[in-house]
Amino acid sequence: MMRGFILGIISALFFSLTFILNEVISSTQGNFLWTASLRYIFMLIILFVILLTKKQVSEVYKHILEFPKEWIFWSTIGFGFFYLPLCFASTYGEGWLVASTWQITIVAGALMTPLISKGKLPVKFLKLSLIILLGIFIIQFENFKVISLKSGLFGIIPVFIGAFAYPLGNRKMMNLVGERLTALQRVFGMTLCSLPFWIIVSIYGFFSSGYPKYNQILSSILVALFSGVIATTLFFKATDLSKNCPNRLAVIEATQATEIVFTIIGGVLLGNNLPSILSMVGIILIVVGIIFGSFLKEKAH
């Protein structure tokens, strides 16, 4: 249990680097189109090398050839329509603000349960998730006091789009592959099949701002490695250790709420101000909502 908990916390730390590094790129006027596309281009290379050494690439290709339309469509939804809006939002808000709002994906996943798995809406969890929504509302209320309406909406709406796209695309692909592929193989396959989308984004990025800057390339490599590969692998390992015990699994999943804390710490180290007291109250409500909501969902199962 303790090992899985520690792995979950460490994975959240690496996941938080996405929000921190994207904020850094944005502050140096890096084009968000390059920020988004470069992550998955580098992820593809890293994952290909890893699976090649394990001789697990051909299995992915075979499955993609069986269901090419499904792979391309849901990979584009799960990765493309998730990360591009998130990078766009990072140009209008600090990392901790985007990370906090991103927690709406937990509620989004619950709302889409009937669409994804034909199950019933988890009504009890959705009622409890009002705590998460209240926390997000408080944070954004504080945010709107110091920025324009346009900037505020540009920082919120894209995150909401990504929050729904991510669980939808990933769960659809999870259902499609079943037990035939490992989690790492599925991530590689989705990265590969979302490549046409990222190529288009890259072309648009080139014509709008030219080649990406050196620091943007370096940051994208770090995001691909830390968040796309290391964090994902650690988190899947943590959940595997507790997959036969719902209560322990709930604790592992709840560790991801610490992304917000790590993002705040990272931002402060980079010179950002601490969130206001009211915003901190909102963050606490989000974390509490996620933890209790996770326990409620697993108890319901």
Image: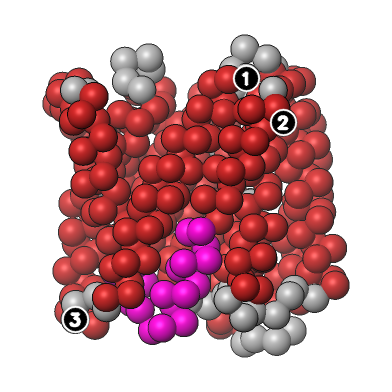
Of the residues under marks 3 and 2, which one precedes in the sequence?
3
Distance CA(mark 3)–CA(mark 2): 45 Å
The answer to if 259 sits in the magenta stretch is no
Q: Quadrant for the N terminus, please.
A: top right
* Residue visible at 43% across and 42% down in the picture: 230
Q: Any mark on residue 242, and which?
A: 1
The answer to if 30 sits in the magenta stretch is yes
* Nearer to us in this view, 50 or 69: 50
Rendered location of residue 18, percent (x, y): 48, 59
Rendered location of residue 38, percent (x, y): 28, 61
Q: Disc 1 marks which amino acid?
A: Ser
Q: Disc 3 marks which amino acid?
A: Gly
Q: Nearer the viewer, mark 1 or mark 3?
A: 1
Rendered location of residue 259, percent (x, y): 63, 52
Distance CA(mark 1)–CA(mark 2): 9 Å
Q: Disc 2 marks which amino acid?
A: Val
Q: Are marks 1 and 2 in contact (CB under 8 Å)?
A: yes
Quadrant in the picture for residue 250: top right
Q: Which residue is mark 3?
A: 210
Quadrant in the picture for residue 121: top right
* Mark 2 surroundings within 10 Å by alpha-carbon count, few (fewer than 14), some (14 through 19), many (20 or more): many
Q: Which residue is mark 2?
A: 251
Q: Is residue 26 left or right of residue 41?
A: right
Relative height, residue 230 to residue 280 (above, below): above
